[in-house]
């Protein structure tokens, strides 16, 4: 189908906006603008695609845009920051569902081998994205029975499902029609569960990033089904950027992608239980005592974790940092790449609280100067500050780079209890000689700490 000059111009403009949007989101200072440019590009792409060849009448396009805008606004206003990882997982699933449904609607019209092959790819990858994102959503919501969704047989079952899915794809290419396509989708749904259910919660940031990439690949495949260049461009950009981010996350965890997808927690050796690690060694403290320590601290490092998000304490942390800096201390924030439940979770939280980007330090930069830190304040983080990753080769997190807060002069951990993180193991840091535990709700404890610092 030939395009009019206006449609060609609009398509080119949308593609440029996609690229500028991704470029803008590479830095916090331009991230908001990049997000808006990407959204504008998608709006332009949708309107252009629906208007080509009079696919839909303009009134129906307007209705669809209005419904989407209202739904998006409601989600933006009602979904709390703590639920943002689950929302990202759900959006990935929606993307996979949209791709497989659109491709399925055109299976009967896919007369060329390329379009039929693309439909098979879209159905399989879109279904994997849909069910895998659903499982990831349940895990992020900490629904305990989500782990039991994994079919028996482990990697062998996953390999069989993949082989059957590819065989069904061959059936579709050979002329199997709609029965073959929906067989691909059914197998893909099972494959998505088989791939995602066994993966531990600590690996969910990597899984979310990978599923985001899958949704882009599925969209690009659907673009070939529809012969829609814009969809191919948008899907390819999402797929490529998701893979790059997945690679970055794996490097941050010192894990290969294959190990994340098919590996299991380290199994050799006997693991110490909480009583062995903590028994008689944990030292509780109070906000008044921590305030006294902060009076003498010239350099303070704040290490945020998921507990900070749960407590919605990011604004109080900002107030504490401003207060300490007004008294001459230097306050920095140590950001572990996989802290939280999605890539960049801590960066987003602190940006929401207007913490200057220059104060956010990457893990390697922090570890290089950790010996100069007078007091490390860990708020709701667990696995990403667990020294067992360095010291115990049998640990589930062995080899994972962590922020070495145990090497600071004093460590204060703000936490509700001694409960383990997503890895499910005790943290020897909490029993270290230079560590004090400030137990309580993160926000309440920090509010009391701010008040104690002011009184001091």
Image (cartoon, rainbow, N blue to C red):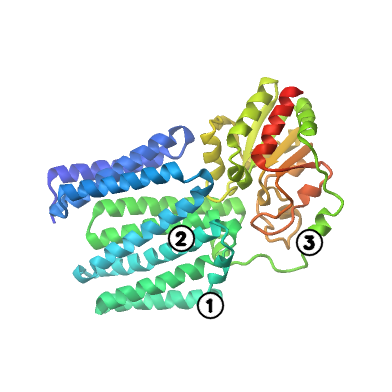
Expressed as whole percent of the image width and height from the top left, the position of residue 159 reads: 49, 75
Label of residue 261 in the image = none
2 or 1: mark nearer the eye:
2
Asked if disc 3 and disc 1 are in contact, CB closer than 8 Å, the reply is no
3 or 1: mark nearer the eye:
3
What residue do we see at 35% from left, 61% from top?
97
Q: CA distance from mark 3 to mark 2?
A: 33 Å
Q: CA distance from mark 2 to mark 1?
A: 22 Å
Residue closest to the eye, 186 or 156: 186
What residue do we see at 35% from left, 47% from top?
71
**Left or right for 325, reference 45:** right
Q: Quadrant of the C terminus?
A: top right
Expressed as whole percent of the image width and height from the top left, the position of residue 436 reads: 79, 41
Other residues around mark 2 within 10 Å, as few (<14) / some (14–19) / many (≥20): many
**Left or right for 353, reference 224:** right
Secondary structure under tag 3 reads loop
Precedes in sequence: disc 3 or disc 1: 1
Note whether 54 is above or below 188 in the view shown. above
Residue closest to the eye, 108 or 160: 108
Expressed as whole percent of the image width and height from the top left, the position of residue 188 reads: 41, 70
Label of residue 273 in the image = 3
Secondary structure under tag 2 reads helix
Q: Which residue is mark 2?
A: 133
Q: Which residue is mark 1?
A: 156
Precedes in sequence: disc 3 or disc 2: 2
Q: Quadrant of the N terminus?
A: bottom left
**Left or right for 423, reference 72:** right
């Amino acid at each position: 189908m030939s395009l009019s000059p206006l449609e060609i111009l609009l398509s080119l403009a949308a593609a440029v906006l996609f690229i500028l949007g991704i470029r803008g989101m590479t830095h916090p200072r331009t991230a908001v603008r990049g997000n808006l440019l990407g959204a504008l590009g998608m709006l332009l792409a949708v309107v252009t695609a629906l208007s080509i060849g009079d696919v839909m009448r303009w009134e129906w396009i307007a209705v669809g845009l209005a419904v989407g805008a209202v739904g998006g606004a409601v989600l933006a206003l009602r979904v709390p920051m703590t639920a943002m990882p689950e929302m990202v997982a759900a959006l990935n699933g929606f993307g996979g569902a949209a791709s497989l449904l659109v491709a399925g609607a055109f299976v009967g019209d896919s007369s060329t081998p390329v379009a039929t092959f693309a439909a098979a790819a879209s159905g399989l990858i879109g279904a994997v994205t849909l069910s895998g994102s659903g499982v990831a959503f349940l895990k992020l919501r900490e629904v305990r029975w989500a782990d039991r969704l994994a079919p028996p047989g482990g990697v062998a079952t996953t390999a069989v499902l993949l082989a059957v899915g590819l065989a069904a794809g061959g059936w579709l290419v050979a002329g199997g029609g709609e029965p073959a396509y929906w067989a691909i989708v059914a197998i893909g749904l099972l494959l998505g569960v088989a791939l995602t259910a066994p993966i531990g919660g600590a690996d969910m940031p990597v899984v979310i990033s990978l599923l985001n990439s899958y949704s882009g690949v599925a969209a690009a495949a659907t673009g070939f089904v529809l012969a829609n260049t814009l969809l191919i461009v948008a899907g390819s950009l999402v797929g490529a950027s998701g893979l790059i981010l997945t690679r970055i996350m794996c490097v941050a965890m010192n894990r290969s992608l294959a190990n994340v997808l098919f590996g299991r927690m380290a199994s050799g050796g006997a693991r110490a239980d909480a009583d062995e690690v903590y028994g008689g060694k944990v030292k509780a403290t109070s906000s008044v005592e921590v305030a006294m320590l902060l009076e003498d601290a010239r350099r303070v490092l704040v290490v945020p974790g998921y507990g900070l998000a749960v407590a919605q304490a990011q604004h109080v942390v900002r107030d504490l940092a401003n207060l300490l800096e007004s008294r001459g201390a230097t306050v920095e924030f140590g950001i572990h790449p996989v802290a939280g439940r999605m890539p960049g979770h801590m960066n987003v939280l602190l940006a929401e609280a207007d913490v200057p980007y220059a104060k956010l330090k990457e893990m390697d930069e922090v570890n290089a100067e950790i010996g100069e830190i007078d007091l490390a304040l860990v708020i709701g983080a667990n696995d990403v500050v667990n020294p067992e990753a360095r010291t115990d080769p049998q640990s589930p997190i062995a080899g994972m780079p962590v922020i070495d807060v145990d090497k600071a002069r004093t460590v204060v951990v703000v936490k509700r209890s001694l409960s383990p993180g997503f890895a499910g193991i005790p943290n020897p840091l909490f029993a270290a000689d230079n560590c004090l535990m400030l137990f309580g709700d993160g926000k309440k404890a920090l509010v009391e700490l701010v008040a104690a610092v002011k009184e001091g």
